[in-house]
């Protein structure tokens, strides 16, 4: 029987970027946008706050874009400070690359395993689904979901009792499956 695990974000991740005021490297998203129109051109920024000093920084969302080329629903979401849009934009690789930022997902997600009835079985087949692109080490997920230590999971991998079509070392942010034989 295939078990389904889901990695779910619990809050917005921290933004990794250097603060100009205090040299801290962590910002939290305020959930607010600033929109500025100059004749037919529009700029939009996501505002983030330094976790150390509270200084505000702007992450560019739109830059010198013709107003008519922006979808009206996007404009409405920007004006309404839509929290869902904040989450979408932080995950958007174009926005992250344009602003030269990275995301810190520590303590911003949880693993839903659907219960612990699978722990007693000899063979466990698990499908892991990511609700958002959260980079996580599969060894950590498997250890947390099966109630094992990370060293025990590493040992099971080297013994061939824990197998997957994807490489379980490193970080993943896309769906995968694995089989554990005890």
Image (tube, helix red, strand yellow):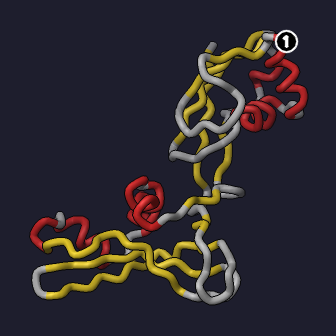
* Above or below 108: residue 86: below
Figure check: 173 above or below 92: above
- Tell whether 1 sits left or right of 157: left
Q: Residue at x 37, y 77 (%)?
A: 45
Q: Nearer the viewer, residue 122 or 176?
A: 176
Q: Is residue 7 visible?
A: yes
The quarter holding residue 169 reads top right
Expressed as whole percent of the image width and height from the top left, the position of residue 22 reads 68, 87
Q: Taking 143 as reference, is 103 left or right? A: left
Quadrant of image for the C terminus? top right
Estimate the x, y position of residue 128 in percent, counting from the top left.
Answer: 60, 30
Q: Is residue 62 left or right of residue 155?
A: left
Left or right for 40, reference 75: left
State the residue at coordinates (53%, 35%). 174
Measured from the top left, where is residue 74 in percent x and y? 25, 66
| Of residues 156 and 41, the one drawn nearer to the viewer in this rendering | 41
Identify the residue at image location x=68%, y=34%. Answer: 113
Figure quadrant of residue 127: top right
Which secondary structure lies at badge 1? helix
| Identity of the residue drawn at 64% across and 51% down | 109
């Amino acid at each position: 029987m295939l078990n389904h695990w889901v990695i779910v974000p619990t809050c917005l991740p921290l933004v990794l970027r250097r603060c100009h005021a205090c040299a801290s490297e962590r910002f939290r998203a305020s959930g607010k946008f600033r929109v500025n129109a100059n004749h037919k051109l529009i700029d939009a920024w996501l505002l983030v706050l330094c976790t150390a000093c509270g200084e505000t920084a702007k992450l560019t969302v739109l830059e010198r874009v013709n107003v008519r080329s922006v979808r009206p629903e996007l404009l409405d979401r920007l004006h309404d400070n839509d929290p869902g849009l904040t989450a979408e934009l932080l995950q958007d690789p174009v926005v992250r690359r344009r602003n030269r930022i990275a995301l810190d997902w520590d303590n911003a997600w949880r693993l839903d395993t659907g219960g612990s009835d699978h722990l007693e079985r000899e063979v466990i087949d698990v499908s892991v689904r990511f609700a958002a692109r959260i980079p996580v080490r599969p060894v950590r997920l498997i250890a947390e979901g099966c109630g094992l230590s990370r060293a025990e999971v590493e040992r099971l991998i080297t013994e061939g009792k824990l197998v997957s079509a994807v490489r379980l070392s490193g970080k993943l942010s896309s769906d995968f499956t694995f089989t554990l034989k005890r």
